[in-house]
Image: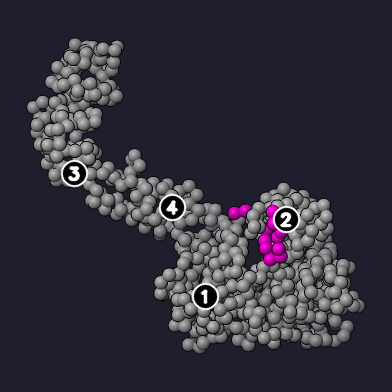
Amino acid sequence: MHVVATAGHVDHGKSTLVRALTGMEPDRLAEERRRGLTIELGYAWTTLPSGERLAFVDVPGHERFLGTMLAGVGPAPAVMFVVAADEGWMPQSEEHLVALEALGVRHALLAVTRADLADPEPVIGRARARMAASGLGAAEARAVSGRTGQGLGELREALDRLVAALPAPRPEAPVRLWIDRVFSVRGSGTVVTGTLPEGTIAVGDELSLLDGPVRVRGLQCLNEPLTSVTGVARVAVNLRGHGVPERGQALVTPGGWTCTDLVDVRLSPVGGPRTSGLAGLSGSGEAAEAAGDGLWGSETAQVRGPGGRDGAGLPPRLTAHIGSAAVVCEVRPLGGPIVRLRLARALPLHLGDVLLLRDPGRDRSEVRVLAGASVLDARPPALRRRGAARERADRLAAARPDAASLLRDHPLLRAGDLLAMGCVPTGRPVCGDWHADPAYWSELGERLAEAVRRHAAEHPLEPGMPVEAARHALGLPDRRLVAALVRPPLAVADGRIVSGPPDLPAPVARAVGRLRAELSAHPFRAPEAGRLAELGLGPRELAAAVRAGALLRVADGIVLPPGAQARAAELLARLPQPFTVSQARQALDTSRRVAVPLLELLDRGGLTERVDEVHRRCRPQAPGGS
C-alpha cells in the first residue's frame, strides 16, 4: 500500500476531498464534524485505478494546529497539496509549503478544489510556480470539486502516477514507527498507530520505546488483522509491555537507532528572505564564532551572511519536529550553517534525518517554520575550549551521512554503532567488529611503534611494553585493537609488545661480560646467587640478558653462556650410553644443582631422553643437527 498526507490552508476542502475520494469520514471527533474543522489527524483509504491501495493522513489546516499537521506529514513519503480555487494561495498554504520544504518532501500532487465555484487556472499557475520554487518540483496539478465530483477520476489517476514514482521502501530496514495516536481496546490493551515508512513489523517482535522494550501482540492495517506489515503502511500495533506510550514517541528496532538528545546539524533555510527567519546562513563570521563559544543564553545568536550581510538570528529556543515528535530544543550556532541542538528529550535518529525547526512564539502573521536541520552527528563531542565551536563547524562543513564521513569524525567505531547512526559499514573491520578511518589507523600504527621505542628506552630491563599500557597510551577502548596494530619488527609475546632482541644497558652488558669470562674455563659451573649479586646481576638484569640472548636460563637463578645445550650434548655423547646423573655431572664438571635442571632442559629440547628412572641417553641427531 501507499500513504499520502494532505496539506493546505484551513477550510480549503482537504477533508471534503478525502471523503469524496474514499467514501470514508476522516474527521473522527464529533467537534470536528460539528464545526467543519479538522483538529486531529484523520485517516481514510481507497483503492486506486491501478489496484494499489492508498491511505490518506488528513491534517488540520488551521494555524493553531500546525504541530498536529507536522505530526501527520512528517512520516508520509508524499503529499496532496490542496488549494481552493475561490480563495487561492493563503497564509497557511505558505506555511505548509515551507514546512514541506524544510522536511525535504519531494513528491507532491496539487489539487485545486472548488473548481465549480471559480476558474482554477490562475490558482494552478501561481501554486505550481510557488511549489516549484520551494524544491517540490513540477508537481502535477488537477482541478476538482469534492461537492460535485468534478475531476475526481483524473485526480485518482494522478494519485496513481504519484505513488508509482515513489522510491521503493526497504523491507529489511530498521523499524521506526512514529506514534500519532494512542488508545486502549478492552481485552487487548494499548494500541498505537502510525505511518510505517519502511521495515517490517511482525506479531511477536520485540521493539523498543524510550521507556524500555515492548512486545507486538497484534497488528492491523486498514482495519484488517495481519501477522506482519511492511512499509509503507498505516498500521495499528497492539503492544504488551510496561508503561503507556505517548504520541511523539517512536517504536524502533532495538539497536537500530541512536537515541540522543544532542545533535550537530546543517541548516537549510526555507521560504526565501521574505518568510525565512534564517536569511544568509551559508556564511560565517565573528558573531557565529562568539555564539559558538558559549553564548547559550544570548537573546539572539546572529549569523553573518554572504558579503558581510547579517541575517536574522536564530532564537535560543525553538521546537524541533520529526515524525510525530515535537521537542523543545536549545540552539547553539557553531559557525555558518552548522548548529548544535540540545533536545529536551532523546529521540531515535540516524545521520541524514531532517528535523524541522519552528518558532512557536512568532507572530501568527509570520511563517513560523524557520529551517530544516539535517543531522550530521548524533554523538557530538563536548566543546570545552575557546575556538572549538568554529573548528567543529569547519570539520562538519563537508560531512555526509555515510560511514566514511562518520569515521573521519569518530575515527574508531563498532559496526553496531555505525548501523545505529544509519551508516552501513564499508570495507573490512580492522579488528573484530571495529571499523577505523584509514588515515587514523595508519597514524595509530606509527604512534604504537614510537610508544614501544620510548618504553624500551625508559624501561630497558623490562621484557617489552605491556599491551594494556599500550592501550592506555593510544587511548584505545579494546586490547584487541593494540594486537591488530602490531606489525614486524614488533611482535606480541606473553602479553607484551617486543621489537627484536633488546640492547643491554652498559652496566648489565659489562656484568655479563665478566660472568662469561669467569665461565670460560668451566662453562657449566653456574655461579651461586651471591656471586651473581656481586657482579650486579639481579633477577631483572638476568632476565634482560636472557631476552637479549647474552645468557642461557637453565632454571631460576641458574644461567650459563649461550650455546651451553649443544656443548653439553656433545660432551654427554662421549659417555657410554645410557648414563646416570652422576656420570653426567662429572663429564660436565659441575654440581648436581646445575646438572639436574640442565639435563631436564636437554630432555625438553630433544637432545637427551630418559631410559628409566635412573638412566638417560643422547638421542641420535639428524645429519647437520646440533
Q: Which residue type carries mark 2?
A: Thr
Secondary structure under the numbered disc 2 in the rendered image: strand
N-terminal of the pair, mark 3 or mark 2, is 2
Q: Which is in the foreground here, disc 3 or disc 2?
A: 3
Q: Which residue type carries mark 1?
A: Arg
CA distance separating discs 1 and 2: 38 Å
Query: Nearest the camera: 94 or 277?
Result: 277
* Count of number-bearing discs: 4
Q: Which is in the foreground here, disc 1 or disc 3?
A: 1
Secondary structure under the numbered disc 4 in the rendered image: loop
Quarter of the figure that contains the C terminus: top left
Question: Which residue in the protein does label 2 denote?
Answer: 230
Q: Is residue 499 magenta?
A: no
Q: Which mark is residue 477?
A: 4
Q: Which residue type carries mark 4?
A: Pro
Question: Which residue in the protein does label 1 denote?
Answer: 332
Is residue 519 something one can see in this rendering?
yes
CA distance separating discs 4 and 2: 38 Å
Chain part drawn in magenta: 242-255
Question: Which residue in the protein does label 3 denote?
Answer: 504
